[in-house]
Image (cartoon, rainbow, N blue to C red):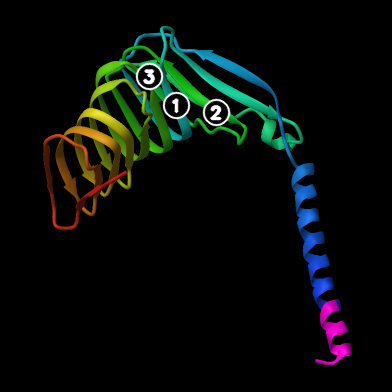
Amino acid sequence: MKTSNKIVYSFLAFAWLSIMVTLVISFFFSRLRGFSTLDKVEVKEWPVLGSYSVVSIQDSWVVSIERQKEGTIQYTKYYFSREREELLEDPDPFFYEVRNDTLFVKGMKQKPTGKFSIHVGPIKSIVLKDVTEVRVKEVGIDSLIVKANHGHLTMEENHGVGFLRFEGKNESRLQIMKIPALELYLDQSKAEIYKEMGDVSGNLARRSEVILPTKLGELNLTKDENSKVSIEEY
């Protein structure tokens, strides 16, 4: 190879390397300038008056349900440095009332930096319609019935429920880490159980699906030809 060609190739290699280093450094400092830290946390509460054993949630996004002595609805807002002002706004107004042994909630739609939670006493059932996700944790009850119509239920690992009956339709979804006993009735819906499972029974219809762990008790599920039951090792 001629000396002149070597010089050209060396120059091109050096130029390419310089460009790549510049891009990496620019990316690093742009990420550094955009780094946000949590400045403060603000909690707003609404008291829920009256007794109820059913929680009905409709047209809402992500909501958590937790066990407490006094019934309240909470909105927790997190303030981050360098956050855009529109992300720090309060949520839009929502509706709630207690009637006929039921807490009705509609329109809980949090901002990107906030979250809703409902603090309940001993409840018997939850009804979901057009809900992005409801997360249940530490409710401490023997049994729970959940009816979902285009709703997503997540049972946290510490949910505290002994028996769950889940009725899901219209692309509803259940996700749960483990539970002693589960009864499923799915219509165009899906259930995923991780870790370990007790006894499972119920029926699957119209392209429904259940994914079970390898560690499970008695399995008594019926299904149509378009539905599926599979076992996976997590």
Q: Quadrant of residue 66?
A: top left
Residue 138 lies in the magenta stretch: no
Residue bearing the label numbered 2: 115
> Where 79 sits versus 8, above or below?
above
Mark 3 against mark 1, which lies toward the viewer?
3
Mark 1 closeness class: few <14, some 14–19, many ≥20 residues within 10 Å: many
Mark 3 closeness class: few <14, some 14–19, many ≥20 residues within 10 Å: some
Residue segment shown in magenta: 1-10
Residue 129 screen position, x and y as percent? 36, 36
Identified by mark 3, the residue type is Glu
Q: Nearer the viewer, residue 112 or 49?
A: 112
Q: Which mark is residue 64?
A: 1
| Residue plotted at (46% across, 34% down) | 60
| Residue plotted at (28% across, 33% down) | 147
Mark 2 closeness class: few <14, some 14–19, many ≥20 residues within 10 Å: many
Identified by mark 1, the residue type is Ser
Q: Nearer the viewer, residue 206 or 191?
A: 191
Tag 3's secondary structure? loop
Disc 3 to disc 1, how far (Cα)?
A: 11 Å
Residue 5 lies in the magenta stretch: yes
Q: Quadrant of residue 192?
A: top left
Residue bearing the label numbered 3: 138
Q: Are marks 2 and 3 in contact (CB under 8 Å)?
A: no
Residue 33 screen position, x and y as percent? 79, 43
Residue 143 screen position, x and y as percent? 23, 21
| Residue plotted at (22% across, 34% down) | 197
Mark nearer the N terminus (2 vs 3):
2
Q: Are marks 1 and 2 in contact (CB under 8 Å)?
A: yes
